[in-house]
Image (spheres, rainbow, N blue to C red):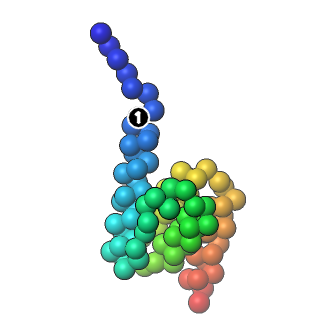
Amino acid sequence: MNTAHIGVPERSDRFINLVDFKWLMAGMGWWVNLSRLQTDRDYIDECLQLAMTSDSELLQERSIEMLGLRGSDSHCDKVVSSRSLASAW
């Protein structure tokens, strides 16, 4: 009997990406609340903007991936623009 579990890997991958993001942020000295990161849009924005201003290219890449998880191109533009402004200083 062949069985397939559709959708479980996506959920699992999403959680792994969140945990990866959390630990990358911790490496920069920023604590992230995973529960809140999954439910509070303002908190997500705050964390992503902070991450995008970091010197860590890996953290910035993970942030861009997380923006994709949110599924909002206009939001992505807003965060990337804020990073560009921060780097201009």
Viewer-proximal residue among 24 and 57 = 24
SS for dot 1: helix
The answer to whether residue 59 is seen in the rendering is no
Q: Position of residue 56 (x, y in %)?
A: 40, 74
Is residue 51 toward the left or the right of residue 26 in the image? right
Q: Quadrant of residue 3?
A: top left
Residue found at the very far top of the displayed protein: 1
Identify which residue is drawn at 65% across, 72% down: 81
Q: Which residue is mark 1?
A: 8
Image spot of residue 84 (x, y percent): 60, 77
Task: Report whether 84 appears left or right of 62.
Answer: right
Looking at the rendered image, the quarter that the N terminus falls into is top left
Circle 1 crowding by C-alpha within 10 Å: few under 14, some 14–19, many from 20: few
> Camera-side residue: 62 or 25?
25
Q: Is residue 8 above or below residue 13?
A: above
Residue type, label 1: Val
The C terminus - image quarter: bottom right
Q: Is residue 19 above or below residue 58?
A: above
Q: Would residue 75 be seen by someone viewing this image from the given angle? A: yes
Q: Residue at x 41, y 77 (%)?
A: 30
Q: Nearer the viewer, residue 35 or 25?
A: 35
The x and y percentages for residue 76 are 62, 61
The relative height of residue 5 versus residue 8 in the rendered view (above or below) is above
Question: How far across and how far down the image is residue 53, in percent?
Answer: 51, 78
The quarter holding residue 77 reads bottom right
Q: Total number of numbered labels?
A: 1
Q: Residue shown at 44%/48% (left/top)? A: 14
